[in-house]
Image: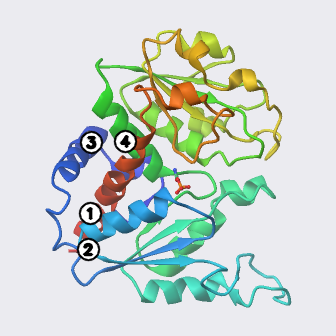
């Protein structure tokens, strides 16, 4: 595996889930695979789960793990091509990336959508420069349009907790004070469309995701109707794709609460975290025994480890 951006990069999903179960049961089994190998994780944006789970997964595989917080630990990096570098950024990605590549065996990159130019974001301009200039396998640790390590962990969690062969999974938009990227809902939709689940997306009008990620999912604008009979509720806020980067609603009627959960089939609640309590989800729901947010976050180590394990195996 040379890159991990999309569900297609992981191949057969059943095989990936079987491998995840093995990794979860015996995480140190492949300790020798990463001996004398180095992973570098580059963060242009903040993180708790992704940086810790990536480091833990790399260590479980016997690798050395280095984290670089761009701008805080390093020079500020210029990312635009063809600019006159007379501002506050003393180094260009064009040099920084091959230097980073020369120090490691695989690279993870977190670089959020900027909401300045939809084409710049949706062409994954930053991430693709790492692919082009590093010469090393590259993992998206949430880039402008996708968060595949999260979506894989979400699928592992659903597979672990499902009690029906084909559960109903609902992705619901929820309110937030700030405009948030579409990477998490994009990837969740992409992975659920590839999995054996009955998948529904619900959001207010204007919050339609990029059709390439919506695929054949059913879109339902009535949140209560979408929740009926659901087995898993996955909440997330995102900014508008059509009116790119705008917050069109802060309607707290969309906050997931006991009122909506009552029409589900005793659904589990999921969220990638960090979560704003009583904006995205009520205390009552997130603190209930049906909340999976902690095991979901724990599965981030498993998803990262499967991906890095496959990259290391491909180097042998
Ligand atoms: N879910 C997730 O990616 O969390 P962090 O932003 O804390 O890494």
| Place of residue 30 in the rendered image (x, y in percent of width and height, measured from the top left) | 17, 65
**Is 172 on the left-hand or right-hand side of 313?**
right
Camera-near label (1 vs 4) is 4
Camera-near label (2 vs 4) is 4
Camera-near label (1 vs 2) is 1
Q: Residue at x 28, y 33 (%)?
A: 160
Residue at the disc numbered 2: 315
**Element type at mark 4:** helix
Q: Which of the 4 quarters of the picture holds residue 77?
A: bottom right
**Is 264 on the left-hand or right-hand side of 17?**
right
Quadrant position of the C terminus in the picture: bottom left
**Element type at mark 1:** helix
Q: Residues within 10 Å of mark 2 (few under 14, many from 20)?
A: few
Residue at the disc numbered 1: 309
Asked if residue 216 shows in the view, the reply is: no
Q: Residue at x 53, y 80 (%)?
A: 133
Camera-near label (4 vs 3) is 4
Dot 1 or dot 4: first in sequence order is: 4
* Picture colour scheme: rainbow
Residue at the disc numbered 3: 17
How far is mark 2 from mark 4, CA to CA? 31 Å
| Place of residue 211 in the rendered image (x, y in percent of width and height, measured from the top left) | 64, 35
């Amino acid at each position: 595996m040379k890159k991990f951006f999309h569900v297609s990069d992981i191949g057969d999903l059943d095989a990936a889930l079987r491998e995840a179960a093995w990794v979860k049961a015996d995480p140190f089994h492949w300790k020798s695979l990463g001996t004398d190998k180095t992973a570098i994780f580059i963060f242009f944006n903040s993180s708790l789960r992704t940086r810790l789970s990536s480091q833990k997964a790399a260590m479980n595989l016997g690798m050395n793990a280095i984290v670089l917080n761009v701008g805080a630990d390093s020079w500020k990096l210029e990312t635009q091509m063809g600019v006159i570098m007379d501002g506050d950024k003393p180094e260009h990605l064009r040099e920084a990336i091959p230097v980073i590549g020369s120090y490691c065996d695989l690279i993870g990159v977190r670089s959020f959508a900027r909401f300045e130019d939809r084409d710049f974001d949706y062409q994954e301009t930053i991430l693709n420069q790492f692919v082009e200039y590093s010469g090393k396998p590259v993992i998206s640790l949430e880039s402008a349009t996708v968060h595949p390590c999260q979506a894989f962990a979400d699928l592992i969690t659903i597979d672990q907790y499902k009690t029906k062969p084909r559960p109903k999974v609902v992705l619901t938009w929820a309110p937030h004070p700030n405009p948030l990227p579409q990477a998490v809902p994009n990837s969740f939709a992409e992975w659920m469309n590839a999995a054996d689940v009955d998948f529904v997306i619900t959001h207010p009008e204007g919050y339609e995701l990029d059709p390439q990620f919506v695929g054949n999912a059913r879109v339902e604008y009535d949140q209560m109707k979408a929740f009926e009979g659901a087995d898993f509720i996955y909440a997330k806020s995102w900014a508008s794709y059509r009116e790119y980067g705008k917050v069109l609603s802060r309607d707290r009627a969309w906050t997931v609460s006991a009122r909506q959960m009552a029409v589900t089939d005793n659904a589990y609640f999921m969220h990638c975290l960090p979560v704003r309590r009583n904006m995205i989800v009520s205390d009552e729901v997130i603190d209930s025994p049906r909340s999976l947010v902690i095991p979901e976050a724990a599965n981030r180590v498993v998803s990262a480890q499967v991906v890095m394990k496959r990259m290391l195996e491909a180097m042998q």
